[in-house]
Image: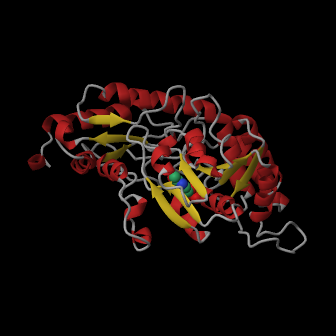
Amino acid sequence: MMSVSTHTATPVAPKTGTPEAIPLVRPTVEPDSTLLSRMDDVLRSGMLTNGAWVKRFEEAAAAYLGVRNVVAVSNCTAGLMLVLRSVGRAREVVLPSFTFMATGHVAHWNAQNVLFADSDPHTWTIDPADCAGRTSTADAVVGMHTFGTPCDVNALERSAGARQVPVILDAAHGFGSRYPDGAMVGTKGLAEVFSLSPTKPLSAGEGGLVTTDDDNLAQELRIGRDYGNPGDYDARFAGLNARMPELSALVGLSALERFPHWLERRMSLVQRYRDNLADLPGLTFQQVPEGARSSYKDLGVQVDPDTFGLDRTALARLLSAEGISSRSYFDPPLHRQTAYRGDFAPPALPVTDRLAARMITLPLYSHMPEDDVDRVCDAVRRAHVDGSPHAV
Ligand SMILES: *Cc1c(COP(=O)(O)O)cnc(C)c1O
């Protein structure tokens, strides 16, 4: 295996005595000679988008996931827009508020009303029971696999009762995740949509993969990613330019070949975090359902200020002083973002609000050095021991 470039390749040398910065995330992309020579072939061929390498990438992803159809697109947002468009009669869509903004935007771009559902306090994914209380009028449900932990798709499908509304999965975080029954994420619902942007566990630079067992939908998506043009220049509907470039497909294919190795390593880094921090009070990790596997797109930790001794914002500040990046995904949650606030009175989403207020996202990427995990954990421990509002 080629040597992996890490964050240590910083152009600016750190000041002596200053610890090197630990980034929140880094894409694991290994330059390899096969990839470079294939890129050379593509550039010479003149076939730069949606060609033979995109098809090969789709086939390899379908084999890895165990799904009938994979349609590669330019990004997950465009893939979700096309899937939601296909649910023609949907005027109202239920989705979680505790998610990245794109989950909601795709409904907006289809002129669908957004109804927010609350999240489960343990798995942090959309709460099917809360969803059931809101779906008397909705005609589609969008679930999201929060930080890679699969949402309960079976319960979401039951949540609409006898009405049979389609369930679509924003699987942006979930490449490599498994459902509790052992099936790969990518195999359930009407369709699942992965993101291959640089912060996701599998990256193609930019890109998305839509998976579906529905051959008609797959065909519609293939037309839809090409403006709605099946090839005769008589657009069947107003599609998008959502094609995947050949160079992205090559990067994605190369990353997919090494993906199982990096996923194992990522999971062992998460275990290291959990073991290191297990004895600290006031920190709660995400609950992954029995039998399921999370890709751990992000390592979120909930900080209870009363028992930990300081809140997540103060913790983030102390980490930052030691050169350690963190985020607070997803704060603000969608129902409190400017783009959504004007639409309606904010719904009561108590679990979402609590998760958003307490979450800190710690550095994690597949090739992160183990020493850096230990450094982050030591800094968290020091914050707990020394940290108090007046010390910040
Ligand atoms: C990253 C992300 C998206 C958008 O993916 P793109 O490929 O950047 O369009 C959608 N949903 C969630 C939950 C995400 O984290």
Q: Please give left or right for residue 42 compared with residue 94 in the image.
A: right
Q: Is residue 114 above or below residue 161?
A: below
Which residue, as the protein is rendered here, is positioned at the far left?
390
Q: Position of residue 313 (x, y in %)?
A: 25, 51
- Residue at the image point whose x is 20% and y is 43% from the top: 305
Which residue, as the protein is rendered here, is positioned at the far right?
232
User: Total number of numbered labels?
Assistant: 0
Observer-nearest of 138 and 116 = 138
Quarter of the rendered image showing ligand 1: bottom right
Q: Position of residue 346 (x, y in %)?
A: 37, 65
Observer-nearest of 251 and 127 = 127
Residue 127 visible to an observer of this rendering: no
Q: Position of residue 275 (x, y in %)?
A: 35, 24
Could you tell me which quadrant the N terminus lies in? top right
- Color scheme of the displayed model: secondary structure
Q: Please give left or right for residue 352 compared with residue 207 in the image.
A: left
- Residue at the image point whose x is 29% and y is 51% from the top: 357
Q: Is residue 243 above or below residue 309?
A: below
Q: Is residue 196 above or below residue 290?
A: below
Q: Please give left or right for residue 258 compared with residue 200 in the image.
A: right
Q: Is residue 159 above or below residue 340?
A: above
- Residue at the image point whose x is 59% and y is 70% from the top: 109
Observer-nearest of 73 and 150 = 150
Q: Please give left or right for residue 76 compared with residue 225 in the image.
A: left
Q: Position of residue 178 (x, y in %)?
A: 59, 33
- Residue at the image point whose x is 81% and y is 52% from the top: 41
Residue 38 visible to an observer of this rendering: yes
Observer-nearest of 161 and 222 = 161
